[in-house]
Amino acid sequence: MLGQLPTVSIITPTYNSEKYIENCILSVASQDYKNKEHIIIDGASKDATVEIVKIFSAKYSHIRWVSEDDLGIYDAMNKGINKSTGEWLYFMGSDDVFVKNTVLSSIFKKRYTSHVDMLYGDVFIGEGDHVFGGEFNFDRVSKQNISHQAIFYSRSLFNRFGGYDLRYSSWSDWDFNFRCFLDRDVRKEYLPLVIARFALGGYSSKHKDLKLYADRLKMFREYLSEECCGVYKEALETAGINHDF
């Protein structure tokens, strides 16, 4: 119906997250935007994560959850996409929080969002006041990823591109964002707004995604100049990542 506020699905993968998950849950619950759901996909945690989620799901009707073995964070995110019902999807780590309780309402109550497929803003990194973000274009996203804690995706993007590619263990979200920026029909809008605070030391910062490094150069050769590809390959070799490209 015209004018109806969209439902926003916040998807949170968890595994042994007992130290953080309560703050994440309360951050979502405190949002003053009512059309939301919190989908928690737990990877069969061995600690008290599930017990904590059970307590809060009994208190908040917008929480739905499952706990079962998975193939990693992107498998969990794909499960969350399939279980969610919202027109807009947002991926929040179990140790992440929104910066204030009006984030969702400031975006989805005050903006007409049917003209755009991908909304993204800025984030605080760690406990300090350092902001990461700004506007991205194809050139920038080819070198640097947008923090997933800064992005709201229209469900139509996952209908168009499918879910996250499980071949990439720690940078599949970059692959998805790259495809979004490659497609000129994807309507993107930058919001000069800090969305969330995300914790340092996540999985992607600790693991080199060698499969993606190899495939990324192949992508670049298709869409970028040979000079740009040479610079990228040199950077890989400097980092000790060698492949037969």
Image (spheres, rainbow, N blue to C red):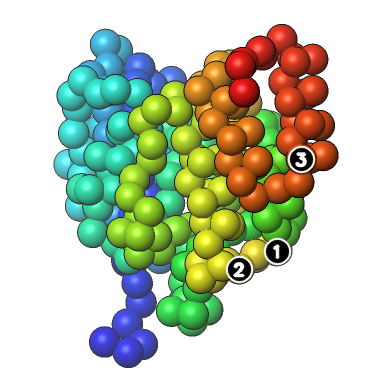
Which residue in the structure is indicated by mark 3?
Answer: 226
Q: Residue 37 sits in which quadrant?
A: bottom left
Q: Amino acid at mark 2?
A: Glu
* Mark 3 crowd level (few <14, some 14–19, many ≥20, 10 Å Cα): few
Q: How many marks?
A: 3
Which residue in the structure is indicated by mark 1?
Answer: 192
Which residue in the structure is indicated by mark 2?
Answer: 189
Judge whether 165 appears above or below 44 on screen: below
Circle number at residue 99: none
How far apart in space, not on screen, are marks 3 and 1 (Cα)? 34 Å
SS at mark 3?
Answer: helix
Dot 1 and dot 2 residues touching (CB under 8 Å): no
Q: Amino acid at mark 1?
A: Pro
User: Looking at the image, which residue is at 66% across and 13% down?
Assistant: 242
Where in the figure is residue 182, as x and y percent of width and height?
57, 57
Q: Is residue 135 left or right of residue 4?
A: right
